[in-house]
Amino acid sequence: MSKYSPLSDHLASLAAAEWRASFAEIEAVLGASLPKAAQQPGWWRSEAEKPHQRAWLDQDWKVAEVGGGVVTFRKDQLAHEIQPPVLKAASETASHEAHKRQALSVTAVVGGAVALVAGLGVLVAKAVRSRKA
């Protein structure tokens, strides 16, 4: 369980599309203090996802504004309403295609192994015949 799980749970429970909270309110939700780095806007909105950002990103929220000890979270409507069905369909198609490729690969490997064994059998049979002759 992440230190930021309570924040994630809180955001998941909100019906509103926006939550404007002071650092003190966020700390109350967390039951712990925010790190000093949280005073910098980059901590909330860096380009590379950090573990603490998973708390809101996993719930389809984004940080819209940071300043004056207040953070405004907004529900990411695109991620929440548009992407999942599209991603689900794309994922199912990709999964189906991957299974087909895997089945073809297995078939090719098995077929190749059978051909190899048959070829070795023919060579052994020829070798045995030539020794008898």
Image (cartoon, rainbow, N blue to C red):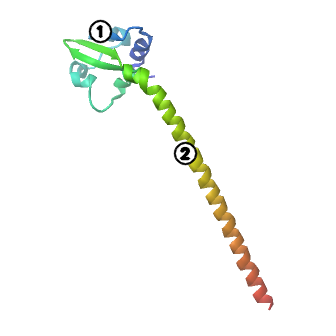
Q: Quadrant of residue 129?
A: bottom right
- In-image side of 104 versus 31 (left or right): right
Is 110 located above or below residue 12 in the figure? Answer: below
Residue at 40% x, 21% y: name it.
60
Q: Which mark is residue 32?
A: none
Front-most of residues 93 and 73: 93
Q: Kindly report the distance in space between the C-alpha atoms of the residues bearing marks 2 and 1.
A: 44 Å
**In contact (CB < 8 Å): disc 2 and disc 1:** no
At label 1, counting other C-alpha atoms closer than 10 Å, the crowd grade (few under 14, some 14-19, many 20 or more) is some
Q: Circle 1 sits on which residue?
A: 21
Q: Residue furthest bottom?
A: 133
Identify residue type, mark 1: Ala
**Element on which disc 1 rests:** strand
Residue 30: x and y, percent? 37, 13
Q: Circle 2 sits on which residue?
A: 98
At label 2, counting other C-alpha atoms closer than 10 Å, the crowd grade (few under 14, some 14-19, many 20 or more) is few
State which tag comes first along the sequence, 2 or 1.
1
Residue 21: x and y, percent? 29, 9
Quadrant for the C terminus in the image: bottom right
Is 27 located above or below residue 55 in the figure? Answer: above
Q: Work out whether residue 58 can be spotted.
A: no
Front-most of residues 19 and 53: 19
Q: Quadrant of residue 37?
A: top left
Residue at 33% x, 15% y: name it.
74
Residue at 60% x, 53% y: name it.
104
**Element on which disc 2 rests:** helix
Q: Nearer the viewer, mark 2 or mark 1?
A: 2
